[in-house]
């Protein structure tokens, strides 16, 4: 067993390393994976309300990268042995206090982006969507604010001020908006 595979840190401190096909090949400390640009599994959630608006969050300024930027509803990394769906639900609860929202995986893609001066996002990102008409209770350590936005307005903002958004935002919401018709109507 390699040193990376024997890591016994808190589950949120490690990521699952994968190959291009999505097969798990080990684990790594999260910060180290982002500093070295190692490909790892991630989840991105986009929630829509009944009228088709998207719930966005502004990442807390204290986040280790992309702090203060607007992003999709929530993001995170599955822990070793945790399913993509379970990780997405855990991050929704942890970041926004949203529980009981049914999620559907609609896409996955690999992206590579430099974030800040010393971090690299190299992720196999699983995109999950859901319907939600309730309120959110953001954890201030994760999220500084949330807002519902019409998709036309969101894409206009992405085009006009791309620096206000996370590196993965455009790819995630493109995929989510393409598939939101598969969602059932929500109840609160």
Image: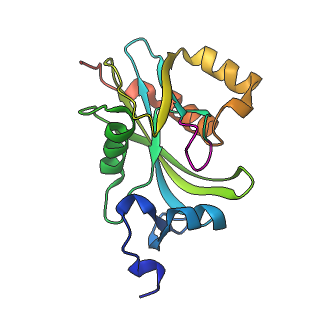
Residue 56 in sight: no
- Judged by its main secondary structure, the magenta piece is loop
**56 in relation to 88, above or below:** above
Question: What count of labels does the image hold?
Answer: 0
Q: Where is residue 180 shown, x and y percent of the image? A: 44, 27
Q: Is residue 102 left or right of residue 79?
A: left
Q: Where is residue 48 shown, x and y percent of the image? A: 42, 23
- Rendered residue at 68%/30% (across/down): 164
- Residue furthest to the bottom in view is 1
The image quarter containing residue 51 is top left
- 63 falls in the magenta region: yes
Residue 3 in sight: yes
Q: Is residue 17 left or right of residue 169?
A: left
In the image, 7 versus 60, the foreground residue is 60
Q: Where is residue 11 shown, x and y percent of the image? A: 36, 62
Q: Where is residue 33 shown, x and y percent of the image? A: 57, 65
Q: Is residue 26 left or right of residue 94?
A: right
- Rendered residue at 61%/48% (across/down): 65
- Rendered residue at 44%/34% (across/down): 140
**Image quadrant where one finds the N terminus:** bottom left
| Chosen colour scheme | rainbow
In the image, 75 versus 177, the foreground residue is 75
The image quarter containing residue 36 is bottom right
- Rendered residue at 36%/65% (across/down): 80
**Image quadrant where one finds the C terminus:** top left
**186 in relation to 29, above or below:** above
* Span highlighted in magenta in the image: 60-66
- 169 falls in the magenta region: no
């Amino acid at each position: 067993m390699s040193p990376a595979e024997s890591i016994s840190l808190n589950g949120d401190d490690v990521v699952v390393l994968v190959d291009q096909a999505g097969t798990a090949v080990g684990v790594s400390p999260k910060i180290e994976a982002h500093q070295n640009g190692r490909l790892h599994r991630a989840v991105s959630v986009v929630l829509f309300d009944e009228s088709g608006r998207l719930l966005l969050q502004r990442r807390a300024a204290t986040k280790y990268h992309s702090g203060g930027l607007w992003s999709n509803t929530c993001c995170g990394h599955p822990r070793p042995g945790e399913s993509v769906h379970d990780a997405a639900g855990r991050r929704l609860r942890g970041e926004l206090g949203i529980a009981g929202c049914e999620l559907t995986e609609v896409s996955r893609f690999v992206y590579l982006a430099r974030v800040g001066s010393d971090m690299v996002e190299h992720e196999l990102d699983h995109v999950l969507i859901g319907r939600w008409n309730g309120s959110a209770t953001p954890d201030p350590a994760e999220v500084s604010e949330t807002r519902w936005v019409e998709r036309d307005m969101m894409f206009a903002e992405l085009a006009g001020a791309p620096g206000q958004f996370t590196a993965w935002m455009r790819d995630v919401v493109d995929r989510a908006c393409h598939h939101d018709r598969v969602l059932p109507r929500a109840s609160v």
